[in-house]
Every structure is written in C-alpha cells, then in structure tokens.
Image (spheres, grey):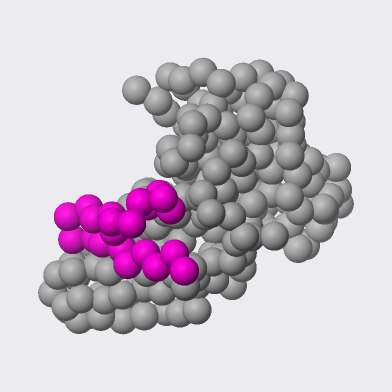
Amino acid sequence: SQTIHQWPATLVQPVGSPLSLECTVEGTSNPNLYWYRQAAGRGLQLLFYSVGIGQISSEVPQNLSASRPQDRQFILSSKKLLLSDSGFYLCAWKVGWRNSPLHFGNGTRLTVT
Amino acid sequence: AQTVTQSQPEMSVQEAETVTLSCTYDTSESDYYLFWYKQPPSRQMILVIRQEAYKQQNATENRFSVNFQKAAKSFSLKISDSQLGDAAMYFCAYEKNRDDKIIFGKGTRLHILP
C-alpha cells in the first residue's frame, strides 16, 4: 500500500533562517507531488506541484522553492524565512491520471518568530 | 484563472439533521473534476466525494451527496443524518482535465451540535 511521509511535524524558526521540509512517498512510482500551505482565512493554497523528476511548477511567486531530486521525494525550501511564511504545510501525492484523489501527509506546522 | 469559492466560513447543524455546504467555481473549461475533502481536528485530509463534469448524475457516497449544477458552476455537498464525527473543515477542489493543478476553496468549518 502507498504511504506518504512528511517531516518534521512542527518547526519553529527565526526570521531569516533557511527552511527545508521533506516529503517522501512509498508504494507507487512516478506520482504527481504537491505542496500546499494552509493559513488562517486563506484556505489551502497551492505552492508547487511536480509531475516528474526535476519538473516543478510554481503557483505563487515568493521566497519559497521546491525540488524533486528523486521520483518519490519532494522538498520545500527557503533561503530566508519571512514572518508571513508561518502556516501549516501539506504535502500530497496522486497518480497521474485525471480524477484520482490527492493523498495528504500529516503536515508540518511552521512558526516563524 | 480558475477559482473556487466557498462562501460559508462556518456552519452548524444539529446532530441527525441535514446540512448543505456551498461551493462555486469559475472556469471556462467544459471538462474538469470536482472534489470535496474533509479535514477533521487531526488535520489529516481525506477525500469525501468526487464528480466528473461530463456526468450529469450527482455523485453519492453513503450519507454524502452532491448537487452539481454545471451551468451555474455550483457544486454543493449535502450531508444527511449528521454525526458528531462529521465535524471538520470541508474543502471544495477543482481539477481541470489535461492539467495537473488542483485548486481549493477557503473551506467551511462545520460544527455538529449534540
């Protein structure tokens, strides 16, 4: 069966520090991978998605970046965190065909102080 | 650009009653997919129900059903016989065919009153 791992579960970082959130999927190959951010009052905001290794689509221009160094690994990064980067970050995967559902990780609560 | 709007930030319903959550979307496409996801207090997102735009019949999953009105670009979720475990944030989502981007609304927080 397929599983998705996302870590860390919680993170407190000072403004200006770097960020690295990691997500891995097991039990499937060539999944579509997604990073969403959930902030109060803003719902679920799509940040990045990837349909293959090295293929990253960015939805929101900001100081975050994403990479997919391996088929089932998706990394969210920042060189310098802002206060506005605080939120709940969710990684998700789905098979490539249409109408397949997203499967979400447990999320990372990021607080930038 | 496609957008998904959930106009009800919060709703409450008495246990065992029926509640309808609203969702509208904006698209110029004719072929797409719509979803409702549930996020309980554990914050683990799970799929509730999905609908293909080319299907006229409304999807149903046990106590959950949708009212899909393509011309009005409306996709509401009806929960019958509400249970305490239905208390959660509910998100409406849209996926265009031949695209891999999935966008969500802002969510509706549903409270179940015992």
In the shown orientation, is residue A36 left or right of residue B63?
right
Q: Residue at x 77, y 62 (%)?
A: A83
Tell whether position B54 is magenta. yes
Q: Nearer the viewer, residue B31 or A90?
A: B31
First to last magenta residue range: B51-71
Is B51 situated left or right of A74 in this image?
left
> x and y percent of residue B36 in the render?
40, 57
Image position of A108 (left or right of B72): right
Vertical arrangement, residue A7 with respect to residue B112, above or below: above
Answer yes or no: is residue A38 visible. Answer: no
Q: Position of residue A13 (x, y in %)?
A: 73, 51
Q: Nearer the viewer, residue A66 or B56?
A: B56
Q: Which quadrant of the view contains residue A111?
A: bottom right
Q: Position of residue B98 (x, y in %)?
A: 59, 39
Q: Give the x, y percent position of residue A92.
A: 53, 40
Q: Is residue A26 visible to us here?
A: yes
Q: Is residue B58 magenta?
A: yes
Closer to us: A50 or A19: A50
Query: Which residue is rendered at x = 62% and y = 19% of the image?
Result: A71
Q: Quadrant of residue B75?
A: bottom left
Q: Quadrant of residue B22?
A: bottom left
Residue plotted at (61% across, 49% down): A36
Count of marks, rendered view: 0
- Please state, as top left, top right, bottom left or bottom right, where the N terminus of chain A lies in the image: top left
- Asked if A54 appears above or below B46 in the picture, the reply is above
* Residue at position x 85%, y 42% in the image: A79
